[in-house]
Amino acid sequence: MRHSDRPSLTLIFGSIILLAACSTAATSPAAVPTVLPSPSKAPIMGDRSLVAGTYRVGSALPLEVNLTVGDGWNGLQDWALLNSNGRTAVSFYRVVSLFADPCAWKRNDFDPPVGPSVDDLVNAMGTFTARTPTAPQAITLAGWSGKVVEWSVPLDAAFDDCDDGMYSSWRFSNWPADEFGMRFHQAPGQVDRIYALDVDGTRLIIDENWTPRTTADERAELHDVVESLTISR
């Protein structure tokens, strides 16, 4: 068999491809990885009037709690949302203890102390017959399971006769600063729909509340805010 002295076409084209690849590698700039911007977080509610949009509940950190509002809402610090009509609100709590008597609440915590679970709290609330609590109902809100209970301030509650003129339900502490405050009510007949959620082992309380003068449209708008919640660890 004769052997040709000419290089094969395969060898020629292969050499051309190899030289072209080397030339491109030598003259092209190094590939720069694309860095995508991280998604921005919603602003914290703060103590201010809010424009329509989505906001974070700062007091719930390290939980990530966001809500969406329309016009006419005001933030109260970073743990409550109040409607400018003065009749509806949503607030977020880390409940530390219930008061045994909402009127004579000073140095009068619930005994035995309320435990840390959802059932611990809602079962203790069920003992306050004067506030006509509903039976706890299992719910799922923002993807998390829990219980919901409604109770109300008695229509004949005399706030002026209470300690410091306040009718109060519980003592709470915000996660970041561990500062204690009280949930005190605004009027006789005020209704609280309380969602107690188990967020991966953390109990989060969401208090949707309204006064007797609240209209059906105002209540619907209030509930839309609760339905807008997103909650994550």
Image (tube, helix red, strand yellow):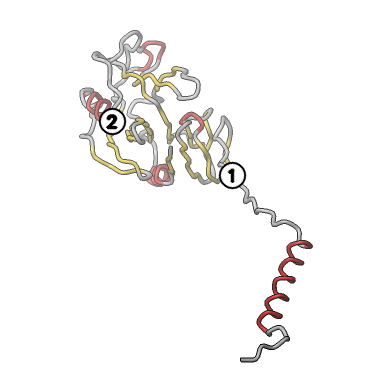
- Secondary structure at numbered mark 1: loop
Q: How many marks?
A: 2
Question: Foreground residue, 126 or 213?
Answer: 126
Of badges 1 and 2, the one in the foreground is: 1
Q: Which mark is residue 107?
A: none
Quadrant housing the C terminus: top left
Question: Foreground residue, 185 or 160?
Answer: 185
Left or right of 12: which side holds 189? left
Quadrant in the picture for residue 186:
top left
- Amino acid type at circle 2 is Val
Which one is earlier in the sequence, the residue at label 1 or at label 2?
1
Picture residue at 27% right of the left edge, 34% below the top: 149
- Secondary structure at numbered mark 2: helix
Residue 120 vertical position relative to residue 229 in the rendered view, above or below:
above
Estimate the x, y position of residue 214 in percent, counting from the top left.
39, 38
Determine the residue located farthest toward the top in the rendered image. 107
Disc 1 crowd rating (10 Å Cα; few below 14, some 14-19, many 20+) is few
Picture residue at 53% right of the left edge, 40% below the top: 55
- Amino acid type at circle 1 is Ser
Instruction: Give the Cα separation between the discs numbered 1 and 2.
Output: 32 Å
Determine the residue located farthest toward the bottom in the rendered image. 1
Disc 2 crowd rating (10 Å Cα; few below 14, some 14-19, many 20+) is many
User: Mark 1 = which residue?
Assistant: 40
Determine the residue located farthest toward the front in the rendered image. 1
Picture residue at 32% right of the left edge, 15% below the top: 103
User: Mark 2 = which residue?
Assistant: 118
Left or right of 127: which side holds 65? right
Left or right of 85: which side holds 16? right
Picture residue at 47% right of the left edge, 31% below the top: 62
